[in-house]
Image: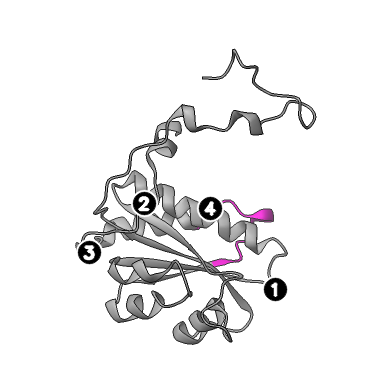
Amino acid sequence: MLELLKKRRSIRKFKKDKVPNDLINQIIQAALLSPSSRKINPWEFIVVDDENYLEKLSHSKIHGSHFLKNAPLGIVVVADENKSDVWIEDTSISSIIIQLTAHSLGLGSCWIQIRNRMNSENQTAEDYIKNLLAIPDNYKVESIIAIGYPDENKPPHTEKELQFEKVHLNKFNKPFFSTSDEQ
């Protein structure tokens, strides 16, 4: 798992190749297996592979979603906010499970944050997406995960990058790692 986490990077450039249905099915199965508080599973997923919808979704936010138009696949992660008070946490967990599964299958991905983001000065990104995809009012949109075959190479993370100073033992500001323990 550590090797997968070191190698997984946010990919914003994708090859034009479509993601095969068997890989999409594996990603969706993994999302449906995501942990959820009290096993309520408030999340739902909209698989988007239509180029026209991907183009429109790429305009969801003022900044940070335009690369989606070049991805062959997007998964919109939503939740019924009336089902759980921790829908944000549950959708966040499923979003990262989608990303880790995609990486394990040789695909790249990038999380596009939607909740609390703006589409324009007068419209939220969430309202834009809900209108575009006919999402009911009681659902909230957490993210879109862009997925495809990577068309960029990013080096893996190294242990030297790890911020061990942010790990505490028993109380805040007591280092978990001594200087000699750091890798």
Q: Which residues are magenta?
A: 32-43
Badge 3: residue crowd in 10 Å (few <14, some 14–19, many ≥20): few
Foreground residue among 23 and 151: 151
Q: Which badge, 3 or 4, comes first in the chain's sequence? A: 3
Q: Which badge, 2 or 3, comes first in the chain's sequence? A: 3
Q: Residue at x 76, y 25 (%)?
A: 174
CA–CA distance between discs 2 and 1?
A: 29 Å
Question: What mark, if any, has residue 82 been given in the picture?
Answer: 1
Q: Amino acid at mark 4?
A: Ser
Question: What mark, if any, has residue 18 been given in the picture?
Answer: 3
Rendering coords of residue 144 (x, y %):
46, 66
Residue tagged 4 = 34
Q: Amino acid at mark 2?
A: Ala
Circle 4 sits in a helix, a strand or a loop, which is it? loop
Query: Do residues under tags 3 and 1 come within 8 Å of each other at their CB atoms?
Result: no
Badge 4: residue crowd in 10 Å (few <14, some 14–19, many ≥20): many
Q: Residue at x 71, y 29 (%)?
A: 168
CA–CA distance between discs 4 and 1?
A: 19 Å
